[in-house]
Amino acid sequence: MQVDVVIIGGNITGSVAALVLEKLGLSVAIIERTPPSTMSYSAEQSYGIRVSSIIPVVKNFLQQLGVWEKLLPERIQSIRSMQVWESDLQHSLKFGENTIQHSPVAWTIENNHIQNICWQLLNDTSCEKIIGQWQKIDRLTDSTGNCSGYELKIVEKEDASEHTRILRTKLLIAADGAKSSVRKWSGILSHTKPYQQHCIVGNVRTKQAHQQIAWATLP
């Protein structure tokens, strides 16, 4: 099978890239090892701990893709302002809403919810969704020896069976996370540096309203 673009990774980055490229008229295949959850979200469900803060320009982008209006309003929390203190609590900065448009500075949304909507929207496109993982990638070259594309051997999982298929593409996008196997295969080097910090992530029910303010303290 020949496509213009192969995306490895069905997370938010991979799914959004697939939606954008498909809208540009390109043929796309996206490969995800584990199918994202297709559950329907409700206002009563407990919240996931992995969230993203969406700034206005990103919101507009998601609106253009048809993602934003599919999100459940009850699971979107707007942030009207943000206050950040130094560790001594004596000095702080406060960021307020857009005074011209009276728009929030950001919206907090669960990552799984965004991914879920993006994955569902791909059903209405010509994008090929493949549940499986790549086994081998070979670079293709033209008559001058320059790279002209890639050939991937994919182990696809369908129902209870597995079978192998071959994909050829001009462009390969690695969206398979921090420990990207594609990045490792390509030889792209990365360097990580620990911050020497720890944090606790969770959902908190407060006694008083948070006033749509994001509160933070710098170490």
Image (spheres, grey):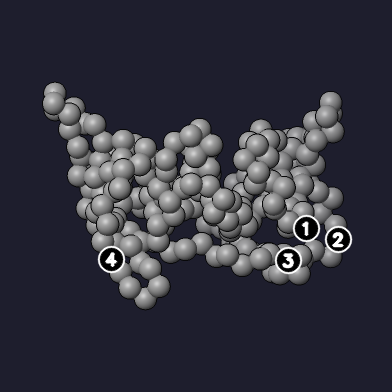
Name the element at disc 4: strand
User: Residue 128, position in %: x, y?
Assistant: 43, 51
Q: Amino acid at mark 1?
A: Glu
The residues bearing labels 4 and 2 have C-alpha atoms spaced at a distance of 55 Å
Q: Could you say which disc has been placed on residue 163 in the image? A: 4
Answer whether labels 3 and 2 touch (C-beta < 8 Å).
no
How many marks the image carries: the answer is 4
Local crowd size for mark 3, using a 10 Å CA cut-off: few (<14), some (14–19), many (≥20): few
Local crowd size for mark 2, using a 10 Å CA cut-off: few (<14), some (14–19), many (≥20): few
Q: Could you say which disc has been placed on residue 42 in the image? A: 3
Look at 68% across and 35% down and name the residue there: 60
Answer whether labels 3 and 1 touch (C-beta < 8 Å).
yes
Name the element at disc 2: loop
Mark before the other along the chain sequence, 1 or 4: 1
The residues bearing labels 3 and 2 have C-alpha atoms spaced at a distance of 24 Å
Residue 201 found in image quarter: bottom right
Residue 153 found in image quarter: bottom left
| Horizontal side of residue 126 vs 90, given as left or right | left
Q: Which residue is mark 2?
A: 208
Of badges 3 and 4, the one in the foreground is: 4
Q: Amino acid at mark 3?
A: Ser
Mark before the other along the chain sequence, 3 or 2: 3
Look at 61% across and 54% down and name the residue there: 117
User: Residue 174, position in %: x, y?
Assistant: 37, 44
The residues bearing labels 2 and 1 have C-alpha atoms spaced at a distance of 19 Å
Answer whether labels 1 and 4 touch (C-beta < 8 Å).
no
Local crowd size for mark 4, using a 10 Å CA cut-off: few (<14), some (14–19), many (≥20): few
Look at 68% across and 40% down and name the residue there: 63
| Horizontal side of residue 17 vs 200, given as left or right | left
